[in-house]
Amino acid sequence: MQWEEYMATDSCLSGGGGWCGDEFIAFQYPEELLDPDINHLEMLMILIGLRAWAEKFQNARLHLWCDNEVCVHVLSSDASRDKKLQEFLREISLVCARNNIDIKPNCIAYSRYHLGEPFQSLVDPRKSLGLKEVKVKPEWYYMSHEW
């Protein structure tokens, strides 16, 4: 690996977001993808972030920050009993293999939703950091293969 990159993702039951360098993603999930299992939505957000910035992450070690312990464990162990999480793991592995990305998942106990309104503007990149928005392509929401 030649260098290190950093990406943070977060998800809720209606949408998700991510950050990498001077760019961010923020969106609402299409209705057909809404899932009551937050672990699935968190993994989907990680997959979307990887697809959005795959070229930037080529040949790099990626430090992934996620507030979902299940996702961090699945990515660290390369295993899950949940069929849908297994599908996400395969798809994420495919993106990483195609781009020579080494993921180092890290669990963070922080979520902007735990903060009061005065503090949310400090962590909302659109308000405080002047980041560029990356538009999510429709195909990023779906698996590339039938796993």
Image (spheres, rainbow, N blue to C red):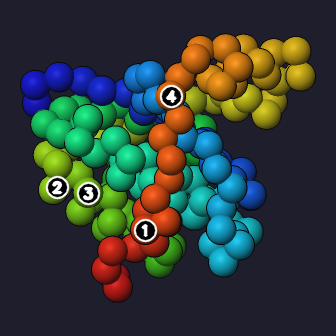
Of the numbered discs 2 and 4, the one sitting upstream in the chain is 2
The amino acid sitting under disc 1 is Glu
Label 2 to label 1, Cα distance in Å?
19 Å
* Residue indicated by mark 1: 139
Label 1 to label 4, Cα distance in Å?
21 Å
* Residue indicated by mark 3: 95
> Residue 131 location, x and y as percent?
53, 23
**Vertical placement of 114 versus 50: above or below?**
above
Q: Splitting the image into 4 quarters, where does residue 40 fall?
A: bottom right
**Vertical placement of 142 versus 22: above or below?**
below
The amino acid sitting under disc 4 is Lys
**Residue 132, labelled with which disc?**
4
Circles 1 and 4, Cβ within 8 Å, touching? The answer is: no
Label 3 to label 1, Cα distance in Å?
14 Å
Label 3 to label 2, Cα distance in Å?
6 Å
Frontmost of labels 3 and 1 is: 1
**Residue 97, labelled with which disc?**
2
Q: Which residue is pictured at 31% across the width and 67% down the height?
A: 90
